[in-house]
Amino acid sequence: MESSGSKHFVLVHGLAHGAWCWFKVVTTLRSAGHRVTALDLAASGVHPARVDEVGSFEEYSRPLLDAVAAAPEGERLVLVGHSYGGLSLSLAMERFPDKIAAAVFVAAAMPCLGKHMGVVTEEFMRRTAPEGHLMDCEMVAIKNSQGAGVALHLGPSFLAHNFYQQSPAEDLALANMLVRPGNQFINDPVMKDGSLLTSGNYGSVKKVYVIAKDDRSSTEEMQRWMVAMSPSTDVEEIAGADHAVMNSRPRELCDILIKIAKKYK
């Protein structure tokens, strides 16, 4: 059971990143008396699997699904997903709605009821591909149990100009050392299933979207497009936040998370 006023936050990184990217947020939330778990999804951070060894989006998300399933009776988690991590959050919300007090999407992929989860990734690619937005990112050929595919390696120019442009130089340097190729699982059956997310499960969990207003990766326009498709979502905004919100505006993000912890039981 949680102590009065204390919450258990579970932090989920975005594509190519790992638990390491949350180090500032972990420190601040723990100092405020909360329990915090920052996860490495499969083939991310220090997780031992290689990207081509992870055969499905379910397997990729397994560390989060296992963590939520293991939450003791009476403990209701605050799930926080960044960027592509929002899709793993959504899968956990559908599976374990009663274990989640709130789900927070931080400049994150947030699907809606009535559409397949992959629609947000497809829309992102539609908006950015013609503009050369991905700059020096590289597509890496992989082959897993679903067949041939590609993983995305985030290039240093992309990270500097479209991801970490408002973040301290030290955080950009850390990212360049630690990012790994990430699979978007575009053709995964979970991404294509328009009936996967249900109103009784996914739709019953309180959702909060944190808009990063200076995000050059998933632009403010793209973020508001996702919010508009889920009109019951509460919205917070952080001015001056790049896509790496936890690095560029960690204090402001933590203030929002602590407010959410007090609001949602």
Image (cartoon, rainbow, N blue to C red):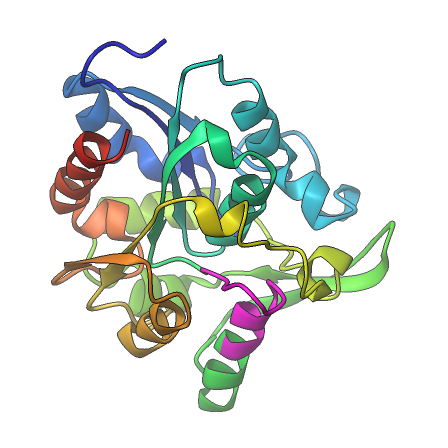
| Residue 5 position in % (x across, y down) | 18, 18
- Give the answer, above or below, for where 234 lies relative to 221: above
For the question of whether residue 174 can be seen, the reply is yes
Q: Is residue 215 highlighted in magenta?
A: no
Residue with the most extreme bottom position:
130
Q: Is residue 113 highlighted in magenta?
A: yes
Residue at point 32% right, 63% down?
Answer: 160
| Residue 106 position in % (x across, y down) | 32, 52
Please identify the quadrant where the C terminus is shown. Answer: top left
**Residue 177 placement, left or right of 69:** left
Circle count: 0
Residue at point 61% right, 38% down?
Answer: 95
Residue at point 77% right, 64% down?
Answer: 149
Q: Range of the magenta residues?
A: 110-123
- Give the answer, above or below, for where 240 lies relative to 203: below
| Residue 159 position in % (x across, y down) | 37, 62
Residue with the most extreme front position:
200
| Residue 120 position in % (x across, y down) | 52, 69
**Image quadrant of residue 221?**
bottom left
Please identify the quadrant where the N terminus is shown. Answer: top left
Of 49 and 74, nearer the camera is 74
Q: Dominant secondary structure of the magenta stretch?
A: loop
- Give the answer, above or below, for where 36 lies relative to 199: above
For the question of whether residue 39 can be seen, the reply is no
Residue at point 25% right, 52% down?
Answer: 245
**Image quadrant of residue 115?**
bottom right
**Residue 19 placement, left or right of 28:** right
Of 8 and 125, nearer the camera is 8
